[in-house]
């Protein structure tokens, strides 16, 4: 049966509203469909071939749900590695002084990371010098490195507070 325009799963499969979709539903051909709504998807995965978009101007967007993330605090120094086996999370760095024009790199051990993945980081808070940069410098199977750089000039302010770094893993493949 061919469908065009917009439809929902309830329209496609009458009587499905409020029902659990089990492993018997393996694929639906969406050729020619311009929009589709699952409502609240509760399965273990959703695979699309043309793209996945969020049309909401505000709200949840595309991301991870509560429970997918975690938090860890770095001990000893800014170069001390941490372990957090989650796809998203927050890392609180050690508050040891990081001089102007200096950088420190640490390893995040994370079994959820594959070598082809993209890891995105952002600085949530904590920079007291105003010129601190946080970036992913290496991705490997099971880990990634984060570099914290104090880009203040030589006579500038040292970074002395703990920095909160958010990260998210975007799963990717090479081919």
Image (cartoon, helix red, strand yellow):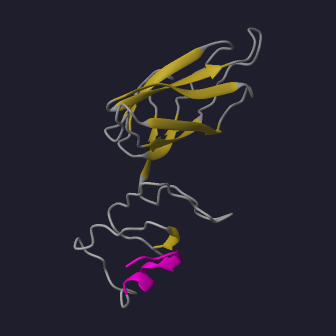
> What residue occupies the far front of the structure in this picture?
2
Residue at 37 percent across and 84 percent down: it is 13
| Picture quadrant where residue 114 is located | top left
Q: Nearer the viewer, residue 121 or 79?
A: 121
Rendered-image quadrant of the C terminus:
top left
> What residue occupies the far left of the structure in this picture?
24
| Picture quadrant where residue 162 is located | top right
Q: How many marks?
A: 0
| Picture quadrant where residue 101 is located | top right
Relative placement, left or right, of 145 versus 130 is left
Q: Looking at the image, is 54 positioned above or below residue 140?
A: below
Say if the magenta span includes residue 130. no
Q: Looking at the image, is 130 positioned above or below residue 102?
A: below
Q: Which of 106 and 116 is in front in this view?
A: 116
Relative placement, left or right, of 16 versus 25 is right
Residue at 55 percent across and 59 percent down: it is 53
Rendered-image quadrant of the N terminus:
bottom left
> Magenta span covers which residues?
1-13
Residue at 58 percent across and 24 percent down: it is 148
Relative placement, left or right, of 3 versus 46 is right
Where residue 130 appears, as percent x and y from the top left, is 75, 28
Q: Looking at the image, is 81 positioned above or below residue 122?
A: above
Where residue 95 appears, as percent x and y from the top left, is 57, 28
> What residue occupies the far bottom of the structure in this picture?
15
Residue at 46 percent across and 60 percent down: it is 66
Q: Which of 18 and 165 is in front in this view?
A: 18
Where residue 56 appears, as percent x and y from the top left, is 64, 66
Relative placement, left or right, of 137 versus 174 is right
Say if the magenta span includes residue 3. yes
Q: Looking at the image, is 94 positioned above or below residue 169?
A: above
């Amino acid at each position: 049966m061919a469908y065009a325009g917009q439809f929902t799963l309830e329209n496609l499969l009458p009587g499905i509203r409020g029902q659990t979709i089990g492993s018997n539903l393996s694929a639906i051909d969406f050729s020619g469909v311009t929009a589709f709504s699952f409502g609240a998807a509760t399965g273990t995965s959703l695979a699309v071939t043309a793209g996945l978009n969020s049309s909401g101007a505000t709200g949840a967007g595309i991301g991870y749900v509560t429970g997918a993330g975690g938090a860890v605090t770095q001990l000893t120094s800014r170069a001390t590695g941490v372990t957090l086996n989650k796809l998203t999370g927050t890392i609180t760095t050690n508050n040891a002084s990081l001089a102007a024009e200096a950088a420190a790199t640490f390893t995040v051990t994370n079994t959820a990371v594959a070598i082809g993945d993209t890891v995105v980081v952002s600085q949530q808070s904590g920079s007291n010098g105003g010129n601190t940069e946080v970036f992913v410098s290496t991705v490997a199977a099971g880990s990634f490195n984060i570099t914290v750089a104090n880009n203040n000039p030589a006579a500038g302010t040292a970074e002395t507070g703990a920095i909160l770094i958010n990260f998210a893993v975007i799963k990717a493949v090479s081919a």
